[in-house]
Amino acid sequence: MSKPHTPKPPYSAAFRQQLVELVQAGRNPNELAKEFGCHVTSILSWVRKARLNLPAGDATPVVPLGASERQELIELRRKVRQLQMERDILSKATAWFANKSEPTLTASTR
């Protein structure tokens, strides 16, 4: 005889909130699922619900990006990296030229 399926009790609100905060802090949902013994889809669902239930003072809820928006985001990030690199090079060149153009002090021949 097999035992009837008994559902697990629901996770507490504090537990769900803790996992949402860990994901928002950069932790991997798959690793958290293994570590805390719950399913990854549950964690992702909690994170999604948390994003949709933002307080009124916060920014608008995060909406998944479409393919074209995702591609544009990738291109913009690439351009930002390129511009930052160019800025750093120009900053170093400016410092070098400023150093180069300072008059050198020579001892007086009096």
Image (cartoon, rainbow, N blue to C red):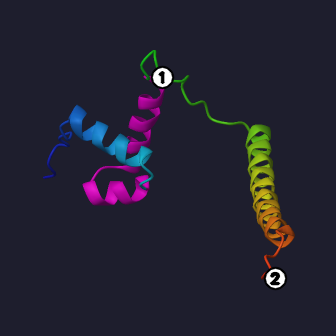
Q: Residue at x 45, y 15 (%)?
A: 56
Mark 1 — residue?
58
In front of the other: 24 or 5: 24
- Spatial distance from mark 2 to mark 1, Cα to Cα? 72 Å
Q: Tell me the residue at 81%/51% (across/down).
A: 79
Q: Quadrant of the C terminus?
A: bottom right
| Residue furthest top as drawn | 56
Determine whether, in the image, residue 22 is placed left or right of residue 54.
left
Mark 1, secondary structure of its residue: loop
Left or right: residue 76 compared with residue 35: right
* Residue 7 left/right relative to 28: left
Q: Which residue is pictured at 53% across the width and 24% down the height?
A: 59
Q: Residue 84 versus residue 108: which sits nearer the camera? A: 108
The reply to whether discs 2 and 1 touch (Cβ–Cβ < 8 Å) is: no
- Mark 2 vs mark 1: in front: 2
Query: For residue 91: magenta?
Result: no
Task: Determine which quarter of the picture holds residue 78.
Answer: bottom right
For the record, the magenta segment spans 28-53
The foreground one among 105 and 28 is 105
Q: Where is residue 30 shown, x and y percent of the image? A: 42, 57
| Residue picked out by circle 2 | 110
Q: Amino acid at mark 2?
A: Arg
Q: Residue furthest front?
A: 110
